[in-house]
Image (cartoon, rainbow, N blue to C red):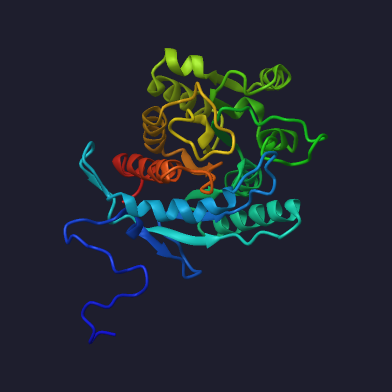
C-alpha cells in the first residue's frame, strides 16, 4: 500500500495537523503484559438497568469521542501526549445471565489490578450496576477503600424487588462489607429522583450526602476537598464513580434517566480535575451513557472529557508522567 500515497486504512483517511495530537492517540492496545500508568477497560453491560438502556454501547462511543479533543490543556499548560493509557479492551458479557456478567467484571478487574498494582484504573460502563463488581475487584488490591459517587440517585435500592440492578450497586457493596457506609460520599443527589426510605438508609449507615442544593450553595472545590479530607484519614484508596445523570438533562441528553435541576458540565469537570490531583484517588468509572438516545454525542463527548480532566489532574500533581 506504500506505493499509493493517498490510500489509507479504513477510517484513517483524516486530516492530520502536524502540530496537533488527538486525545485518542494516547490509547495503546494492551499486549497482555505490563500496562502503563493508566489501565482503561470497558464493561459493556446494560441489561441490569431498571429502565431502557443502550449503555452497553458507551465504551466504544466514549473512546471514539476522545478523537474530538487534543492532548493539550491551555488552562494548565500541560500536554498529555506522552501519557501511556493502556486500553485493555472490553470485558465479554454473558448474553443472558446478568449476575454472571457482573462476576466477570469483578474477576477481570481483580486480575488486572493484581497484574498491574501500580496502574490507575478507568472503567467505562455500562449502566451503574457495573460499579459494584468493579469496586469489588478493585477492593482486592487496596482492601480498605472509599468511594465518591457523582449521581442524581442514591443507588441504595433494596435487592429483594429486582436483584442487583443499576439502582443497587452501593447497597450491594455496603451489605457485602466491601464498602463501609461511612466511606461513601454522594455528590449531586437530586430532588424528586429518590425516595425518603433510601435517603434514610444512607444516613443511618453513615453515607455523606451532598444534594444539588448543597452543590448550588457551595463551591464544588470546597465539597471535593472536604470529601477527600474525610476519607483519606480512614481508607487506603478512593474510587470515583461518575454517573453521568448527575448532569442536568441540558448537558447530558444521552442518559437513560435524564431530568432537570442537575449539575452543569463545568462543575463536574472541575470536580474531576481536583480529584485527579490526589494520590489516594486510584480509580474512576463512568456510567449511564446511552449513545442510542444521545444528541450529537453530547453525553459521550462530556464523558471523554471527564477522562481527560482526571488525567490532567494526575499529571498536574506529578502522579503520572
Screen quadrant of the N terminus: bottom left
Residue 121 picture location, percent across and down: 49, 49
Confirm whether residue 119 shows in the render: no
Q: Residue shown at 72%/21% (left/top)?
A: 201
In front: 5, or 246? 5
- Looking at the image, is 130 positioned above or below residue 235? below
Say how many tags the image has: 0
Is residue 186 toward the left or the right of residue 129 in the image? Answer: left
Rendering coords of residue 254 (x, y %)? 50, 40
Q: Which of 29 and 300 is in front in this view?
A: 300
At 50% from the left and 43% from the top, the residue drawn is 284
Q: Looking at this view, is 96 or 164 the one in front?
A: 96
Q: Where is residue 107 in the image (x, y as percent from the top left)?
A: 66, 56
The residue at the point 21 percent across, 56 percent down is 20
Considering every residue shown, the one lying at the far left of the view is 19
At a point 51% along the width and 69% down the height, the residue shown is 32
Q: Residue furthest top?
A: 217
Q: Residue furthest bottom?
A: 3
- Judged left or right of residue 150, residue 3 is left
Task: Look at the image and tell me whether residue 154 can be seen.
Answer: yes
Spot occupied by residue 248 in the image (x, y as percentages of width and height):
48, 28
Residue 171: quarter of image: top right
Q: Could you say which quadrant of the image residue 127 lies in?
A: top right
Amino acid at each position: 500500500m506504500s506505493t499509493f500515497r493517498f490510500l489509507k486504512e479504513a477510517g484513517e483517511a483524516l486530516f492530520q495537523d502536524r502540530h496537533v495530537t488527538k486525545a485518542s492517540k494516547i490509547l495503546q492496545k494492551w499486549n497482555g503484559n505490563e500496562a502503563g500508568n493508566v489501565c482503561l477497560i470497558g464493561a459493556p453491560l446494560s441489561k441490569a438497568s431498571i429502565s431502557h438502556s443502550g449503555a452497553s454501547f458507551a465504551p466504544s462511543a466514549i473512546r471514539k469521542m476522545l478523537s474530538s479533543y487534543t492532548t493539550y490543556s491551555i488552562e494548565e499548560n500541560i500536554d498529555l501526549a506522552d501519557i501511556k493509557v493502556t486500553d485493555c479492551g472490553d470485558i465479554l458479557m454473558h448474553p443472558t445471565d446478568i449476575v454472571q456478567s457482573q462476576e466477570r467484571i469483578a474477576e477481570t478487574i481483580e486480575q488486572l489490578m493484581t497484574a498491574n498494582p501500580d496502574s490507575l484504573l478507568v472503567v467505562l460502563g455500562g449502566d451503574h450496576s457495573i460499579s459494584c463488581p468493579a469496586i469489588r475487584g478493585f477492593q482486592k488490591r487496596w482492601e480498605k477503600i472509599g468511594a465518591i459517587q457523582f449521581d442524581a440517585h442514591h443507588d441504595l435500592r433494596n435487592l429483594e424487588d429486582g436483584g442487583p440492578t443499576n439502582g443497587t450497586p452501593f447497597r450491594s457493596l455496603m451489605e457485602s462489607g466491601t464498602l463501609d457506609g461511612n466511606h461513601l460520599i454522594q455528590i449531586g443527589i437530586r430532588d424528586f429522583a429518590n425516595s425518603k426510605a433510601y435517603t434514610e438508609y444512607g444516613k443511618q449507615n453513615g453515607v455523606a450526602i451532598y444534594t444539588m442544593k448543597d452543590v448550588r450553595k457551595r463551591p464544588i472545590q470546597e465539597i471535593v476537598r472536604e470529601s477527600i479530607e474525610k476519607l483519606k484519614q480512614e481508607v487506603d484508596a478512593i474510587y470515583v464513580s461518575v454517573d453521568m445523570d448527575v448532569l442536568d438533562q441540558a448537558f447530558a441528553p444521552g442518559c437513560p434517566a435524564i431530568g432537570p435541576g442537575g449539575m452543569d458540565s463545568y462543575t463536574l469537570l472541575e470536580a474531576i480535575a481536583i480529584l485527579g490531583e490526589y494520590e489516594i484517588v486510584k480509580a474512576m468509572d463512568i456510567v449511564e451513557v446511552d449513545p442510542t438516545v444521545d444528541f450529537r454525542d453530547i453525553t459521550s463527548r462530556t464523558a471523554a472529557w471527564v477522562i481527560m480532566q482526571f488525567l490532567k489532574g494526575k499529571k498536574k500533581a506529578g502522579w503520572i508522567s
